[in-house]
Each structure stands twice: as structure tokens, then as C-alpha cells.
Image (cartoon, grey):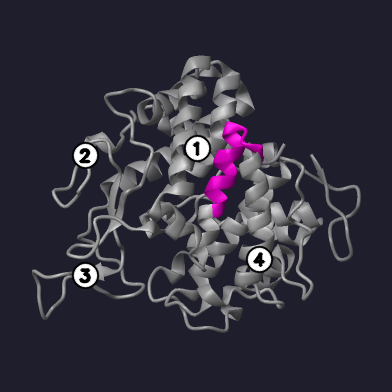
Amino acid sequence: MFLLAGAAMAAPDSKFDIAAFDRARVMKNAKKYLTDNPVTVTAAQSPRSAGGKHDFFSEGDYWWPDPKNPEGPYVQRDGMTNPDNFVEHRKFLMKISVQVPALTAAWKLTKDRKYSDHAAKHIRAWFVDDATRMNPNLQYAQAIKGRFTGRGTGVIDTIHFVEVARAIPFLAESGSLSKSDAEVTKTWFAEYVKWMTTSKNGTDERDAKNNHGTCWLMQVAEFARLIGDKELLAYCSNRFRTVIVPGQIEPDGSLPLEMRRTKPYGYALFNLEALVTICQTMSATGDNLWEFQTADGRGVRKAIEFMFPFIADKKAWKLPADVMYFDQWPMRQEALLFGGLAYKRADYIDVWKKLPADSDVDETIRNFFIRQPVLWVS
């Protein structure tokens, strides 16, 4: 239960119970997922992958055959997704990111082991079982035919492990994930974080100036929280304060690196979700990034304030519409829930309640990666 107060907000004695509010949606989805078996990267392979059976592979979204040289290296069309690229592994990853958190949330709400038991099957398939587990790297992610067998930008594909990582301690608590399997899973994430922080592709992504750099930090922070790496959490906090906020948020709260793209609305929302997820992760460690701002006023508070009018009323958006999927946004942006709780802004939460929480559009699922707030809010 949360007390929300403030000028032009809910009355001081009003309360918002996230578990009660979201229970029907959580249970409806979780019941559907009880019949779905785990599917991992070993279930499909691409002849264009330079990796093996256990290696995640994906191709850059906006890269297409060159009309002038159809068999040659692909060329870029920013914002335009090539439907012929290999996306099966990404779809499998999105499936676990949708289903495991929902099943885990259902267990948290009911303590019924059928939900946590089924979620644990997915965890063992992806991270424990030798026959189906994924190798802990993204060396072959976002390849481009004729140019790269994998790129640092591919690291963004595992944003869908963030809420899965959030679910793992609950599954261990339920007993559905044994102590030994939980330790093996944590070891997988420790190895993946080591790859993210030491490999060329991982460090290239870390140094990206836009949402890619934000999403790298979001992943490392949540994975470090899972494995209990305090040194890495401190590094994430410092990088958020010294690199991410100063480099990406303007004093007025705008996100120019996203807003100059061909999908300015969707990219701004996407990056904002990653920013607030970092704050939510770090707040659980006692590090309050919600209140951080630079000397000239840059911070997450300003970023949410900037985007809020355009989430509440998309018609107020002043930039051109996104070239694709503009009609799919906004979703139930967690920036409004997490920010509403952090800043005692009931107006944020009121808008959040009215937005769609689920989608069956792959592009939306891919870019809306925090779906079970009951796992994030006590």
C-alpha cells in the first residue's frame, strides 16, 4: 500500500494497492501460460549465424538488401524493420520475458506452486539444462549480412532478461527453483555480466551515447543486484550520475538523442523506461537515484515531467509521428508508476491506470519490457 500526497494530487489519506489493482490481469495471463512449454535458442538456427546451437543470434532490424547489389552487404534504412531478418531467438527471449514474470507474479499473489513450478521450468531450460541452455554471451547478436557477425548493439536484445532476473529470487523463495538450480542460474548471470563488462561488443554497447548505453546499464544493474555484486552496483550508480544523465537528459527533461530519430516518440518512451528501471533497481539497494540531478537540473524527475503531457495526451506531441508503430504507444509506461510512487504524483498513476498493459504486437512487446510491477513494488 502506498500513500500518495501533494498539491493537485490525491488526498493525503488515499492509497494505491498495486497487487489488488493488477491481480485480475496477472491471473488471466498466468493461467494461459501454464500450457506453454519452454523454448530456447536451441529450437531454431539460422544458416547466417557464425555461432553454434547454444548461441543467441539476431540480425540488425533496419538493414536491408542493397537494390544496387542484392547479394552484397546490407544497407541501412533507419526505423524501417526488415521482416526477412532472423528473429526467432529474439521471439523466444520475448516469450520467456512475458511468461516467467507473469507466472511468478501469480505465485506472489496466490502462493500457488503451479505457477512458480511452471516458471521454474523456463529458468532451467534457459540457464541450467545442458541440452537447451543459452551460452552467456551475445557475441552473435544483431549481425549484418556482409558486414558483421555480431555487434555491440546486440546487447540490447537481453533487456528481456531484466524482469526474468527480477523473478528469480521469488522462484527460489517459492521452492520451485532448487537452491542448486538457483546458484547455477546466478552463475550464468555472473558470467554474462562479465562478458558484458569485458568483451569488445559489451564495452562498445556500454559506451553508446543513446538508449543502448542506458539499456546496458539497466541490465548490468539488475543482474548485479541478482548476483549480489555490490562493487558493480556502485559502478552502475556512478555511471548513471556521471555519464547517462549528463549525456542524455537536457535541463528541460527532453531526450534529444532519441527525439531526433525516425521514431522519436517511441524511442523517448523506451529510453525513459530504461532510466526509471535503473532508478527502481538501485533504490532497492538503498541508493536513491530518483532525487539525483546535475548542477543544471538534469535528472529523471525532469525527464518524466517532460514526457508526461505527451503520454497523457499523445495529440500534444510536437515532433513528427514515428515512421512505424506510432499507433501502438503509449503503453502502461512504468515511468508513470515508478515515478508516481517516488515523487508522490497521483496524476502520473491515474494516467498509468488507464493505459493498455499488454500487447500482441511483437514490436511493442520488444520495446515494452517491464510488465509485472507487482515484482518491483513491495
In the image, taking residue 196 as reference, residue 6 lies left or right, namely right
Please report contact status of discs 2 and 3: CB closer than 8 Å, yes or no: no
Three-letter code, disc 4: Val
User: Residue 144 appears in which quarter of the rendering?
Assistant: bottom left
Question: Does residue 45 lie above or below 147 as drawn?
Answer: above
Badge 3 or badge 1: first in the primary sequence:
3
Please report contact status of discs 2 and 1: CB closer than 8 Å, yes or no: no
Q: Indicate whether residue 223 is drawn in magenta.
A: yes
Which residue range is magenta in the image?
217-230
Q: Which residue matches tag 4?
A: 245
Q: Residues within 10 Å of mark 2 (few under 14, many from 20)?
A: some
Q: Which residue matches tag 1?
A: 164
Viewer-nearest of labels 4 and 3?
4
Q: How crowded is mark 4: few (under 14 residues within 10 Å), some or many (20 or more)?
A: many
Q: Which residue is drawn at 88% across and 60% down?
A: 6
Q: Residues within 10 Å of mark 1 (few under 14, many from 20)?
A: many
Using the rendered image of the protein, determine whether residue 91 is visible from the camera's viewpoint: yes
Q: Residue at x 33, y 36 (%)?
A: 135
Q: Which residue matches tag 3?
A: 64
Q: Which residue matches tag 2?
A: 52
Residue 91 or residue 246, whichever sits in front: 246
| Whole-number angstrom distance, CA of label 2 to CA of label 3 | 24 Å
Three-letter code, disc 2: Gly
Q: Is mark 1 on a helix, strand or loop?
A: helix
Q: Is mark 4 on a helix, strand or loop?
A: helix
Badge 2 or badge 1: first in the primary sequence:
2
Coordinates of residue 255 in the picture (x, y in percent): 59, 73
